[in-house]
Image: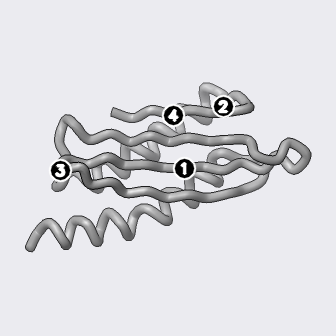
Amino acid sequence: MITVHAKNFTISDEDKEKIEQKAAKLLHLAKDMSDESTRIRVEFELIAAKKDLILGTLTITLPHHDILRAEAKEEKNVLTVMDKLETEVRPQIERHKNKTKH
């Protein structure tokens, strides 16, 4: 399950759909270590209104209480923040995959 939340601003439906697609790719990448209990939560918060600074947090909750997490900040663009989150969490997914194979 994928959830996307915004605090202090609104994400357009188009951007929300793109974010969900990117999160679905991460879910697919983690498919070997996930099941129906796996959750991806993407949160965006406007933290500096004058600069439109957005803080993004991506949390992947896997079976056996394993959690992968990434944070990123960027001005104005939630899709850029999502790209940074994706870049940060991909190596974590790979490391976790390798750890669970042994």
Q: Residue furthest left?
A: 102
Say whether disc 4 or disc 2 marks the residue closer to the N-terminus. Answer: 4
> Marks 4 and 1: in contact by CB < 8 Å?
no
Instruction: Say what secondary structure mark 3 lies in.
Output: helix
Give coordinates of residue 67: x percent, y percent. Answer: 33, 54
Say whether disc 1 or disc 3 marks the residue closer to the N-terminus. Answer: 1
- Indicate left or right for 33 with 23 as reference: left
| Cα–Cα span, label 2 and label 3 | 32 Å
> Marks 2 and 1: in contact by CB < 8 Å?
no
Q: Residues within 10 Å of mark 1 (few under 14, many from 20)?
A: some
Q: Three-letter amino acid code at disc 4?
A: Val
Q: Residues within 10 Å of mark 4 (few under 14, many from 20)?
A: some
- Indicate left or right for 40 with 101 as reference: right
Q: Nearer the viewer, mark 1 or mark 3?
A: 3
| Cα–Cα span, label 1 and label 3 | 21 Å
Residue in the foreground of this view, choosing between 67 and 75: 67
> Marks 3 and 1: in contact by CB < 8 Å?
no
What residue does disc 2 label? 11
